[in-house]
Image (cartoon, grey):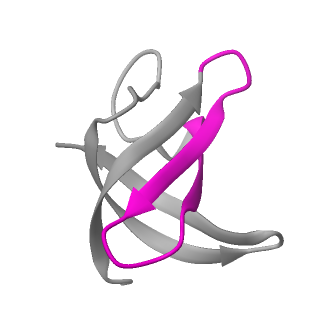
């Protein structure tokens, strides 16, 4: 299992279903609504703290298994 990272939501667009997370010591990471853990409408709020794993995607780093803190 990949290491877990704590980060902050940089921005998230509900209409498009994606956004970016900021890491404390690293590059911003793409996040898609499908990897947000939880029931119902999956969204994130700017400035919200989250925990996630990082994977290499076709266009760069992307978040996996995002959990709201």
Left or right side of 49 for 19: right
Instruction: Return the residue found at the far left.
Output: 69
For the N terminus, the image quarter is bottom left
Q: In the current view of this chain or complex, which residue is farthest to the right?
A: 58
Quarter of the picture containing the C terminus is top left
User: Which span of residues is magenta-colored?
Assistant: 14-33
Left or right position of 2 against 55: left
In percent of the image, x 41 and y 29: which residue is there? 44
Q: Where on the picture, by quarter, is residue 17?
A: top right
Residue occupying image coordinates x 49% and y 61%: 64
Q: Position of residue 36 (x, y in %)?
A: 44, 41
How many labels sit on residues? 0
27 to 8, vertically: above or below: below
Residue 20 highlighted magenta (yes or no): yes
Front residue (pair 27, 39)? 27
Whether 47 is among the magenta residues is no
Q: Is residue 11 toward the left or the right of residue 50 in the image?
A: right
Which residue is rendered at x = 55% and y = 62% of the image?
A: 29
Image spot of residue 56 (x, y percent): 66, 79
Q: Position of residue 61 (x, y in %)?
A: 63, 72
Q: Nearer the viewer, residue 39 or 11?
A: 11
Image point 53% across, 73% down: which residue? Answer: 27
Depth order, front residue of 7/65: 7
Corner quadrant of residue 53: bottom left
58 displayed left or right of 48:
right
């Amino acid at each position: 299992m990949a290491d877990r990272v704590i980060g902050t939501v940089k921005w998230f667009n509900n209409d498009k279903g994606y956004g970016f997370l900021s890491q404390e010591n690293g590059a911003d990471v793409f996040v898609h609504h499908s990897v947000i853990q939880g029931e119902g409408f999956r969204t994130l709020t700017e400035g919200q703290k989250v925990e996630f794993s990082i994977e290499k995607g076709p266009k760069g780093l992307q978040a996996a298994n995002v959990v709201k803190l």
